Amino acid sequence: MYSVNKELIIRSSSEAVDFALLKDGKLIELHKEEEKSNFQVGDIFIAKIRKPVAGLNAAFVNVGFEKDAFLHYHDLGPNLSSQLKFIKLVSAGKLKDFSLKTFQFEKEIDKDGTVTDVLSANQSVLVQVVKEPISTKGPRISAELSLAGRFIVLVPFSDRVSISQKIEDKKEKDRLKRLVQSIKPKGFGVIVRTVAEGKNTAELEKDLQNLLSRWTAMCKKLPTAHHPSKVLGELNRASSILRDVFNDTFSGIQIDDEELYQQTKDYLQEIAPSKQSIVKFYQSKDTPIFEKYNIERQIKTSFGKTVSMSKGAYLIIEHTEALHVIDVNSGNRSNKATNQEDTAMEVNMIAAAEIARQLRLRDMGGIIVVDFIDMANPENRKVLFDFLREEMSDDKAKHKILPPSKFGLVQITRQRVRPEVNIKTREEDPNNEHGEIEAPILIIDKITSDLERLLKTHKKVVLNVHPFVAAYLSKGFPSLRSKWFFEHKKWVKIIPRDAYTYLEYHFYDKKGNVITD
């Protein structure tokens, strides 16, 4: 297995913190943590039932958001009655021991029951955010609480021990199960995460103690807490991203804020002391951190409606209320492949890798339909399907991919827990004050892909462009023009033209005629 170079770049400003995850220099995830978000996935609230609705078998719950949250009967968890009794006793100050060792559990609720049997208006209940508020919908919540640690997840009011399905080795599964059973406190269930594979008792015990102290801290707040209010916040986003995405493949974490750098270092000291050295404080005043790692440019090329790929191919991404649609286009490529099928296969494979990246990058959820280029050979369709599955295997969001339909459409569903990342990449048109254009920086990519295509059929090409762009192509060492020379073994003459608009360019052949194809 070849090694993957994973880096996390963190940029801090007064309003927000941005996290960019790079894989071999390519941007694959982008997160933004703004201070104002009060409803992050994983936050626990003491909330009030507004009204149970028998017809929906769900209750509307006041969690302090302008819209009531939705709590379905199936999300109540079997031990709801025990949780309600516990809250009542703790809030009244009658129960001081939060360990659940001596706590008398109530009978489990009927799994096919109705909400009005178990909940009533104005009742207080502990709930956890499972889906952040998206567009017009309030947050989606669950009364089955879980506290996520690095290796394990602690589930209060349960006794179950379950092991991540991604751990395949039966011996290891049994070892972890025995280990957890021996350290697990009474009244708490435990889910063992994939990263616990191969870990020893001390590491898991430390994680467990950490989670138990968070649970105790939360319970201490209950007697004085306002109903509704947040009683347990998720870790700050830096720590929660690290907790979920960090693994041994990380080769560097760069941070441009001293305080955050310290916090991250301390957190890594806890979870992976040997890796502490990969955290670096980025101090350059001249080049902002996202410029240095080419992230700004990648954002502009990756978030528009059109996404360019290698070999002149591109994607069109459209969003509707019901679903996302992605169209794969081969672009105007010189058809060197022996036949249409090979061309289609080549473009589809490039597109599949880019689509897997785009879904993570934009955090697109719900139903996604991809219109790949038609392929007649069923074997090719299977290869494409397997490749797409493989490319998406790193994606943490739950997803399902259906094999291509007869029309070459691939349907994907992907779990959506927070609003989709949308970044406006179009800019004001310098030639028309009311118009908008694709980000000008993309012009370079367009010229490069056109050149690649034309040099296959023309020995000599001359590029005519606006003087600013001409200067950009010829500056520095090696300049972009030199890179073209090394790649194609042909020197491209560049002529600056004052008469051209900013983003205009044309290629001429050796006879001085405009190349139009």
Image: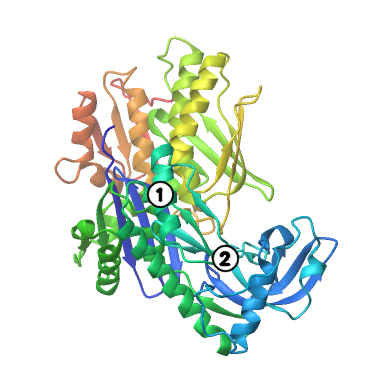
| Vertical comparison of 247 with 506: above or below | below
Residue 317 is situated, as x and y percent measured from the top left of the image, at: 55, 42
Quarter containing the C terminus: top left
- N-terminal of the pair, mark 2 or mark 1, is 2
Residue 283 is situated, as x and y percent measured from the top left of the image, at: 19, 66
Horizontal side, residue 5 vs residue 15: left or right:
left
Residue nearest the viewer, comparing 195 with 483: 195
Residue nearest the viewer, comparing 230 with 217: 217
Residue 291 is situated, as x and y percent measured from the top left of the image, at: 28, 56
State the residue lying farthest toward the top: 338
Q: Residues within 10 Å of mark 1 (few under 14, many from 20)?
A: many
Residue at 44% x, 35% y is: 391
Please tell me whether mark 2 sits on a helix, a strand or a loop. Answer: loop
Q: State the CA–CA distance, disc 2 to disc 1.
A: 22 Å
Specify the label residue 176 is tagged with.
1
Q: Which residue is mark 2?
A: 145
Q: Quadrant location of residue 104?
A: bottom right
Residue at 43% x, 37% y is: 170
Closer to the eye: label 2 or 1: 1
Horizontal side, residue 406 vs residue 25: left or right:
right
Residue at 58% x, 39% y is: 400
Horizontal side, residue 224 vs residue 478: left or right:
right
Which three-letter amino acid code belongs to the residue tagged 2? Answer: Leu
Which three-letter amino acid code belongs to the residue tagged 1? Answer: Leu
Q: Quadrant location of residue 461?
A: top left
Quarter containing the N terminus: top left
